[in-house]
Amino acid sequence: MIKAAEQAYKTEFTARDRQLLQGHFHLAESMADLIGPHCEVVIHSLESFEQSVVKIVNGHHTGRKVGSPITDLGLKMLRLYEQTGEITPKSYFSNNKGGEMLKSSTCILMGENGKPIGMFCVNMNLSHPFPEIIKTLMPDTTQHHSFDMTENFSASAGDVVEQALNHAVIEVDADDSVNLKGRNKAITKVLFDNGIFELKEATNIVANHLSITKHAVYKYIREFKS
């Protein structure tokens, strides 16, 4: 089986292939940070099966490190992918050497021209007490700054602008140092600093809401940029 997989996937990588694979390293770190310390995230390179692990976060769950080989199940998945174009199974349960249960998910990473160049694997260790796992997914109430972040989940760009505008109005109106004359400019500055004017609908929506012209909004933006 290993020889068959090597024949199918052992190809010379280009510099672009390695660059594309490395572009997923930050994603691996973010994924592990999101789920928490009970989650291992691994990136395999198909350039070398013997040293396929090129990125790993929380590798203590399986005892692996950069330079570790691909697994037997990984090779089987590659063979099935060659035959069907699908990863099977998409998620599965297994055990590490210590007998701890893992729930895992794997996807194929593509290079140039749709060529498989790697595998992105997430392994969640389920053997720890469930309350301990849940605790890592909840906000730390001792760190008040963790509640300062807001994010607007909307179906349209217009909704994103409207919600951001509402937050900006509340923020500016609560600031006693901003007088009525400077209110519109201050609101526009908050939106500018938050990148809202990268959305095409922002200028019109802000102008209409503040009862000023688009040219006034553009003037403020030019001042901020300068």
Image (cartoon, helix red, strand yellow):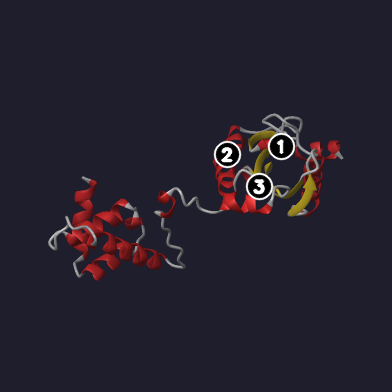
Residue 113 sits in which quadrant? Answer: top right
Task: Determine whether, in the image, residue 7 is placed left or right of residue 213.
Answer: right
Which residue was labeled with disc 2? 25
Front disc: 3 or 2: 2
Give the mark nearer the N terminus: 3 vs 2: 2
Q: Which amino acid, mark 3?
A: Gly
Residue 114 tag number: 3
Foreground of the two, 9 or 33: 33
Q: Position of residue 190 (x, y in %)?
A: 28, 55
Q: Which amino acid, mark 2?
A: Phe
Quadrant containing the C terminus is top left
Residue drawn where x is 25% and y is 54% of the image: 189
Give the mark nearer the N terminus: 1 vs 2: 2
In terms of secondary structure, where does tag 1 sit? loop
Residue 154 sits in which quadrant? Answer: bottom left
166 to 186, vertically: above or below: below
Which residue was labeled with disc 1? 46
Residue 194 tag number: none
Task: Determine whether, in the image, residue 145 is placed left or right of residue 123.
Answer: left
Q: Position of residue 2 (x, y in %)?
A: 84, 37
Q: Which amino acid, mark 1?
A: Leu
Crowd class of label 2 (few under 14; some 14 to 19; many from 20; radius 10 Å):
some
In terms of secondary structure, where does tag 3 sit? helix
CB atoms of marks 3 and 2 within 8 Å: no
In terms of secondary structure, where does tag 2 sit? helix
Residue drawn where x is 31% and y is 64% of the image: 165
Foreground of the two, 128 or 160: 128
Residue drawn where x is 39% and y is 64% of the image: 160
Q: CA distance from mark 1 to mark 2?
A: 15 Å
Q: Position of residue 48 (x, y in %)?
A: 73, 32
Give the mark nearer the N terminus: 3 vs 1: 1
